[in-house]
Amino acid sequence: MNLNEMMKIAERGHEFIDYMNMFYSIEHDGVYAEEMDFSHEEIVDGINEYFKNPEYLKDVMKYGADTVDRERVRDIILNKRKELAHV
């Protein structure tokens, strides 16, 4: 991976974080924030986990994040919360 590709991934990642904040962050008056209230760390960790799938990463790099991507990351975060609750 070259520097330009790494910069593009970072750019898409920041866009994706902003997109997630619009829906799930109390700090950003997210649409579903009252129900979910995801922290910045949870969002970043969820996106990092999501980007481990090469097909998902490829699609986000090509088109940007959409509703399907957002909901998949939401599910990753909710599943991690469940796992932590059972520890």
Image: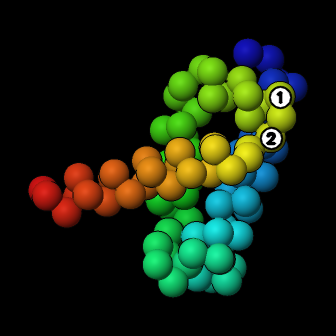
Task: Locate residue 35, reporting x and y percent.
Answer: 46, 78
Residue at position x 43%, y 47% from top?
76
Instruction: Classify 10 Å Cα crowding around label 2: few (below 14), some (14-19), many (20 and above).
Output: some
Which residue is at the far top? 1
User: Label 1 belongs to which residue?
Assistant: 62
Q: CA distance from mark 1 to mark 2?
A: 6 Å
| Amino acid at dot 2 | Gly
Task: Locate residue 50, reporting x and y percent.
Answer: 54, 37
Quarter location, residue 60: top right
Residue 78 visible in rendering:
yes
Quarter location, residue 18: bottom right
Q: Which mark is residue 64?
A: 2
Residue at position x 60%, y 20% from top?
54
Residue at position x 26%, y 58% from top?
82
Provide the secondary structure element on which disc 2 rests: loop
Q: Which mark is residue 75?
A: none
Q: Quadrant of the N terminus?
A: top right
Question: In the displayed structure, does residue 17 sit left or right of residue 85?
Answer: right
Say above or below: 53 vs 69: above
